[in-house]
Image (tube, coloured by chain):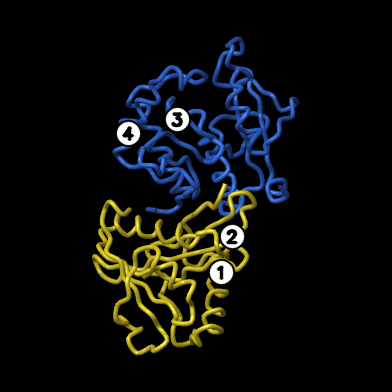
Chain colours: A blue, B yellow
């Protein structure tokens, strides 16, 4: 393990970003299937994201980690915590999120990394609540949040402020988990 | 889903609590004298890891990495709480420290344990460590047992 904070689960290393991640991360961000519910990003935008992730670790002590499979597969995506980057009725909040290369889907990696990120958020970062966000159409993402014990109140549903209100991706669901709920599992 | 390892500072309160437990066990089993061996100063600890149960987030173990010189690092304060022993958590912690040491340029890892700790000795032997002469400030400690392992990039 390297510079803190880093996490390691049974199958994954959640580590700080390295220059060698920039290429595979840009490939992932340009994959229309991975980015089905987001917009694909070009290399510059992808690199800027990495810089922001690293800045978050420096400022807040948490962020989105580069995700590496311990079986030797190298970089496979990202997972971790970030401040919600827009204003909505529930903000300011910290969200848990993940994004995996297509060929790594279906292995339970998102759940494994998400669980570690939540644990870190509550026990180390001292957060009282962590949210998860997904557009209505992203069932896959919603299922992982449910597996993580997060719960949705339809009253929290919101329209993403960065999208036109008639955009099919604009309606979003909000999932929540409090420190107390996490500790009581 | 096993344990989650996380980096922490040497003076992290949870880590301090685990280290105190480790020290009191060392007093009981091996007659260690915490006054004589207060452990490394925080500045010498390159990396400190906490192990948590992935399901409940309960802290179940810790281990530290101390830099001795450019290519030699020492494993410090490996500890797993009694209820969690026998699940190879010590081995997971040790391997993570080895990887970290290799990344820092280490070619060998050293450690000290007590002759009254057969479980620790077995762990280190199983993980590829061999007995060496007592090194550094353990040289005059008759109840200390010292181990070393050569690290290679592929071992990490």
Residues marked 1 and 4, same chain: no
The residue tagged 3 is: A104
Task: Residue at 49% x, 21% y: name it.
Answer: A38
Q: CA distance from mark 2 to mark 3?
A: 29 Å
Q: CA distance from mark 3 to mark 4?
A: 18 Å
In this rendering, which labeled residue sits more in front, label 1 or label 3? Answer: 3
Q: CA distance from mark 1 to mark 4?
A: 38 Å
The residue tagged 4 is: A22
In this view, the residue in front, A173 or B48, is B48
Q: CA distance from mark 1 to mark 3?
A: 36 Å
Element at badge 1? Answer: helix
Residues marked 2 and 3, same chain: no
In this view, the residue in front, A110 or B124, is B124
| Residue B78 in the image, given as x and y percentages of width and height | 47, 68
Badge 1 or badge 2: first in the primary sequence: 1
Residue A44 badge:
none
Residue B18 badge:
1
Whether residues under marks 1 and 2 lie with C-beta atoms below 8 angstroms apart, the answer is yes
Depicted B129 relative to depicted B98: above or below: below
How many numbered callouts? 4
Residue B59 badge:
2
Task: Residue at 60% x, 68% y: name it.
Answer: B82
Residues marked 1 and 3, same chain: no
Q: CA distance from mark 2 to mark 4?
A: 34 Å
Residues marked 2 and 4, same chain: no
In this view, the residue in front, A27 or A153, is A27
A118 displayed left or right of B100: right
| Residue A179 in the image, given as x and y percentages of width and height | 68, 48
Q: CA distance from mark 1 to mark 2?
A: 8 Å
Other-residue count near label 2 (Cα within 10 Å), few / some / many at <14 / 14–19 / ≥20: many
């Amino acid at each position: 393990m390297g510079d803190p904070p880093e996490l390691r689960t049974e199958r994954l290393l959640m580590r700080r970003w390295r220059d060698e991640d920039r290429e595979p991360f840009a490939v992932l961000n340009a994959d229309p299937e991975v980015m089905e519910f987001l917009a694909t990003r070009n290399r510059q935008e992808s690199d800027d994201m990495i810089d922001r992730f690293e800045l978050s670790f420096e400022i807040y002590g948490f962020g989105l980690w580069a995700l590496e499979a311990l079986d030797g597969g190298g970089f496979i995506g990202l997972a971790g915590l970030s401040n919600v980057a827009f204003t909505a009725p529930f903000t300011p909040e910290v969200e848990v999120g993940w994004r995996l290369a297509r060929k790594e889907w279906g292995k339970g990696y998102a759940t494994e990394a998400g669980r570690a990120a939540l644990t870190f958020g509550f026990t180390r970062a001292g957060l009282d609540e962590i949210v998860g966000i997904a557009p209505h159409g992203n069932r896959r993402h919603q299922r992982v949040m449910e597996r993580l014990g997060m719960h949705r109140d339809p009253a929290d549903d919101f329209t993403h402020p960065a999208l036109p209100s008639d955009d099919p991706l604009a309606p979003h669901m909000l999932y929540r988990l409090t420190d107390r709920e996490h500790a009581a599992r | 889903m096993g344990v989650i390892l996380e980096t922490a500072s040497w003076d992290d309160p949870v880590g301090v609590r685990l280290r105190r437990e480790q020290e009191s066990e060392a007093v009981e089993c091996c007659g260690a004298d915490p006054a004589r061996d207060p452990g490394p100063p925080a500045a010498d600890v390159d990396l400190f890891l906490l192990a948590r149960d992935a399901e409940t987030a309960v802290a179940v173990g810790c281990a530290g990495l101390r830099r001795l010189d450019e290519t030699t690092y020492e494993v410090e304060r490996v500890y797993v709480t009694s209820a969690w022993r026998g699940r190879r958590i010590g081995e997971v912690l040790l391997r993570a420290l080895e990887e970290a040491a290799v990344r820092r340029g280490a070619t060998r890892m050293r450690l000290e344990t007590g002759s009254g700790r057969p479980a620790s000795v077995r762990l280190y032997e199983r993980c590829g460590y061999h007995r060496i002469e007592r090194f550094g400030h353990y040289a005059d400690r008759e109840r200390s047992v010292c181990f070393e392992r050569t690290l290679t990039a592929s071992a990490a």
